[in-house]
Amino acid sequence: MASGNAQPSGLMSSRVMAQRPQHRHDPVHHDPRHREPHHRDPLRRDPLRRFAFELPARTESVSRARHLSEERLVLWGRGSEIRDTAALVVSELVTNAVLHTASSRIVCELRDGAEALRIAVRDEGGPAGPRIRDCGADERGRGLLIVDALCASWGAERTGHGTAQIVWAELAHSLGEPC
């Protein structure tokens, strides 16, 4: 092997990027000497947790993305219903990035906030953005219909770098709670 970065064929590399929880500034208690450890301030938000990973844009990356996402949600203590739904959404978004763009790599990011779990997949772009289409009896092409049905919201944004885009979806934390 000529390069230290080369990998044996058949192995898939992934780069995992994680960030520590970020506490938001609390304007009410800006003096660090003034703390009441036994009382939670209703204006103070829980920290935002983020986890991102990069994978090659190949069909076998879909299962790896699903597995990495499920693992992280377990570590974050999320329930099985939101984990299962998030795994399905990750599968659909990564599949779309692999099949419908000219990407060589994709980045998937999970952001766990106070109200929702945001799943975002960044690709290297393609000729058109994502859209829901009428599939008729065809079993393929229903990914965004599934995402639309499961998520509180979803969308796509160009990143400003050529045709690269981020397709995102948000799952409310109230998922699975009784009506």
Image (tube, rainbow, N blue to C red):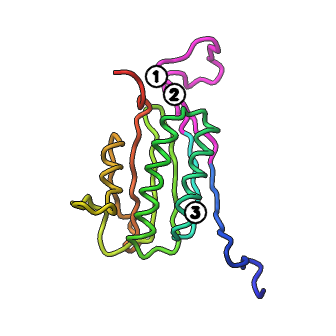
Q: What residue did someone put label 1 on?
A: 43
Q: Earlier in the sequence, mark 3 or mark 1?
A: 1
Which labelled disc corresponds to residue 26? 2
Marks 3/1: CA–CA distance:
35 Å
The magenta segment:
19-48
Q: Position of residue 92 (x, y in %)?
A: 42, 56
Discs 2/3, front: 3
Q: Position of residue 89 (x, y in %)?
A: 43, 50
Q: Are marks 1 and 2 in contact (CB under 8 Å)?
A: yes
Helix, strand or loop at mark 2 = loop
Which labelled disc corresponds to residue 54? 3
Q: Are marks 3 and 1 in contact (CB under 8 Å)?
A: no
Q: Earlier in the sequence, mark 1 or mark 2?
A: 2
Left or right for 141, reference 56: left
Marks 2/3: CA–CA distance:
33 Å
Badge count:
3
Name the residue located 72 percent from the left edge and 79 percent from the top edge. Answer: 6
- Majority SS type along the magenta span: loop
Helix, strand or loop at mark 1 = loop
